[in-house]
Amino acid sequence: MKSRTEYLTMRVASRRGFVNLTPEVERVVRESAVAEGLVLVNAMHITASVFINDDEQGLHHDYEAWLEKLAPHAPVSQYRHNETGEDNADAHMKRQVMGREVVVAITGGRLDFGPWEQIFYGEFDGRRAKRVLVKVIGE
């Protein structure tokens, strides 16, 4: 069995944003030389997520608006977590909704996606460097 592990460093300048990770994950899979296997892509911070969806700006806007309705950032006093001096309780909740990780099959040395599927990093408390794990295993 072959494996490859790589850590991507994410730097989103704003508090929230989405980054398409698909080209970087494809590169890691290609460099792994795994023809049949799996790739795990995992946000290694509790205020960020990794998910699969369409790369369409209207959808990204809709996610932003929907998440803000579910867990609004302000007023920060509405969250008990923020009594610790943080102001990111909403980011923890947004991550919980959007998910921590994805696993994608590798078939014929390529990501085995359905139509329009792409891998995204979701940032909900940005402005600092965070890591994403990409782990490829297979033959």
Image (spheres, grey):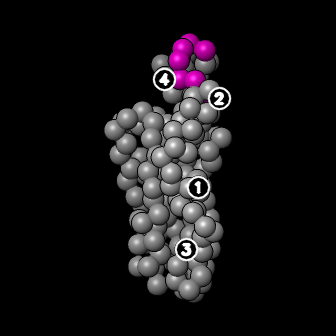
Which residue type carries mark 3? Leu
Which residue type carries mark 4? Glu
- Mark found first going from the N terminus, 1 or 2: 1
Residue at mark 2: 70
Considering the numbered disc 1 on the image, is that residue within a helix, a strand or a loop?
Answer: strand
Pointer 4: residues within 10 angstroms few (<14), some, or many (20+)? few
Residue 74: where, in percent of width, then height?
Answer: 53, 18
Which residue type carries mark 1? Asn
Name the foreground residue: 60 vs 35.
Answer: 60
Residue 115: where, in percent of width, then height?
Answer: 61, 67
How far apart marks 4 and 3 lie (CA) works out to 38 Å
Q: Are marks 1 and 3 in contact (CB under 8 Å)?
A: no
Residue under the image location 52 percent in, 83 percent down: 109
- Residue 76 lies, with reference to residue 34, above or below; the image says above
Residue at mark 3: 111
Considering the numbered disc 3 on the image, is that residue within a helix, a strand or a loop?
Answer: strand
Quarter of the figure that contains the N terminus: bottom right
Pointer 1: residues within 10 angstroms few (<14), some, or many (20+)? some
Residue at mark 4: 86
- Residue 99 lies, with reference to residue 36, above or below; the image says above
80 in the magenta segment? no
Q: Are marks 1 and 2 in contact (CB under 8 Å)?
A: no
Q: Which residues are magenta?
A: 71-78
